[in-house]
Amino acid sequence: MNEHAGRGPHENSLTGLSPWAERLALNCLWEPEPWPNASDAADEVLAGPPGVGSTTPHALCLPEGYVERYAYPLVIWLHDRNRDEKDIIHQLPAISERNYLGLAPRGPRATGTGYDWNLNDDDTNAVVEDIQALVARLRSEYHVHPDRLYLVGQGTGGTAALRLFLRRPDLFAGVANLDGDAPDMAHPLAAFRHLHGRRVLCSWTNPAESRIGRLIEQGRLLYRAGLQVATRSYQSKGTSAVARMLRDVDHWIMDGINTAIRG
């Protein structure tokens, strides 16, 4: 499955996907139309403004062998530049085929060949509200663990994921920034009481020497804010580094869940 991790999101054909990925694609629900209301049954913190749904196009994906009685962790996938929400079809199975429900909103900026994030303060607040509404509706239909919501983004989506997390860390169990730059962290302590003890994964494939200093400083800033920071670098050619990086997201999430259970 890992050989498809870098496959472009705009291809209409499922040719080349493994049988499991084809079933995943058929289980993905693209929702360009707004949901009318957030679920009354969802936790208040995730319900969003009363009576407001999300108009953001997005994809919802079920794990292989979905079991209704099991409360699944949720991976909220933020795609890279020039891609869109359907990117999750190729990335979620590279993380895990069975362990997660998946939700992927579309970036708000059209690029001509796809979409991007490039969030300012107002955009950040709007995307947080959209995610709250999407998660609330997802929880009304599927069994999502309320304390295991993970933002995972790649490239510019990784930068956006970390920015969203720093704005509202109370909503998420952790964030994984994969090959993304550091967002503007001029005031990362604004939500200090919610940041303490939260988990962050920063991973890069074949980082250039010019980036290494910035990446180290990013980790230091996050650590000083009270976060549990893991940093990883993958040096290899082709798509193998990306495949390993995505598999390790699963290990990082599950390690955190197991630690919390034991604690």
Image (tube, rainbow, N blue to C red):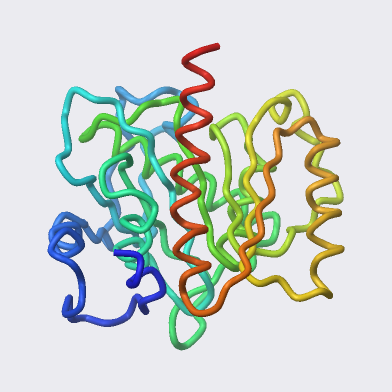
- Residue farthest toward the bottom in the current orientation of the protein: 112
Q: In this picture, is 254 found above or below 231?
A: above
Q: Quadrant of residue 172?
A: top right
Q: Is residue 117 above or below residue 255?
A: below
Residue 149 appears at what percent x and percent y? 46, 36
Residue in front for this viewpoint, 112 or 248: 248
Viewer-proximal residue, 260 or 142?
A: 260
Q: Quadrant of the C terminus?
A: top right
Q: Residue at x 47, y 88 (%)?
A: 112
Q: Which corner quadrant of the image does residue 121 belong to?
A: bottom right
Q: Position of residue 118 (x, y in %)?
A: 64, 68
Residue at 81% in and 65% down: 212
From the top left corner, tell me how far across and down residue 143 is, in percent.
25, 29
Q: Which residue is depicted at the point 17% across and 38% down?
A: 66
Residue 5 appears left or right of 71: right
Examine the rendering and report whether any part of residue 132 can be seen.
yes
Image position of 13 (left or right of 81): left
| Horizontal relation, residue 15 to residue 185: left or right | left
